[in-house]
Amino acid sequence: MLYINPENCRNRETRESFQGLKLAKFQRKKMLKQFSLVFFVLFACYVGVNSRELKHITKELEVNAPAYEAWELYRNLGLINIIVPKLPNVQSTQVLKGDGGVGTVAKTTFVPDEAGNSSYTEEFIVIDDKKRVKAAKALEGDCLAFGCSVLIVEFDIKEKSQNSCIIKSIISYAVKKEFEAKDPKPTVAVEAITQTSKEYLERNN
């Protein structure tokens, strides 16, 4: 990589060009941060909770497949129809409403565990084809059954190269005041979903 120190540059045009590139890069990063902030504020408004009450669990996984292929799997009903049924504790999946767009409601039925979790229902609330962002709000099940008031799962597909991408998952949740001492946490199998989708995408790429 070529590095040019603007302090040692005698050519004024080169120095100004270099500084302009640094400013543009800074502005892009600032815009991405602002987008993330606005995104979660809108989420909070949508679900009726103060954004400062939301806690976040973030994971990233690299996939050797193009971003557009990963997005095609994630954007509509690919996860519900193809990936989630492959998980070992899943009995069945069902689309209760919609065709995969915003407003779609999907239900996953599990083999009951010790905590009594038997199903999970979610509603798709964001599908952004331009930014490759999808988010779903839990309606029933998981930590909503033992102390959480809000649970949102977001997937963000980022292009790394022509033939690889990063799948970023963000679990956002809020805990009811009367359950704060118990500190309940989501158990939704996001890591298993992203790992299984990685294997599926790489096998079929």
Image: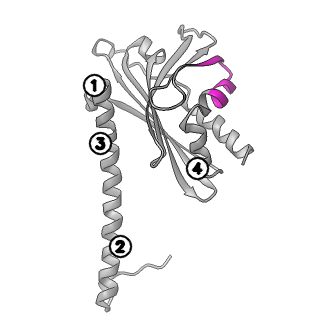
Q: Earlier in the sequence, mark 2 or mark 3?
A: 2
Residue type for callout 4: Tyr
Query: Dot 2 lies on which element?
Result: helix
User: Which residue is denoted by mark 2 in the rendering?
Assistant: 21
User: Which residue is denoted by mark 3 in the rendering?
Assistant: 38
Q: Which residues are magenta?
A: 81-95
User: Separation of disc 2 and disc 1 at Cα?
Assistant: 39 Å
Q: Earlier in the sequence, mark 1 or mark 3?
A: 3
What x and y, as percent, mark residue 51? 28, 32
Label 3: how many residues lie within 10 Å, few (<14), some (14-19) or many (20+)?
few
Query: Dot 3 lies on which element?
Result: helix
Q: Earlier in the sequence, mark 2 or mark 1?
A: 2
Q: Residue at x 48, y 17 (%)?
A: 142
Would you say the residues marked 4 and 3 are in contact, meaning their CB atoms lie under 8 Å apart?
no
Image vertical order of residue 82 relative to residue 178, above or below: below
Label 2: how many residues lie within 10 Å, few (<14), some (14-19) or many (20+)?
few
Pick whichever, 131 or 177, lies toward us: 131
Q: Earlier in the sequence, mark 4 or mark 3?
A: 3
User: Which residue is denoted by mark 1 in the rendering?
Assistant: 49
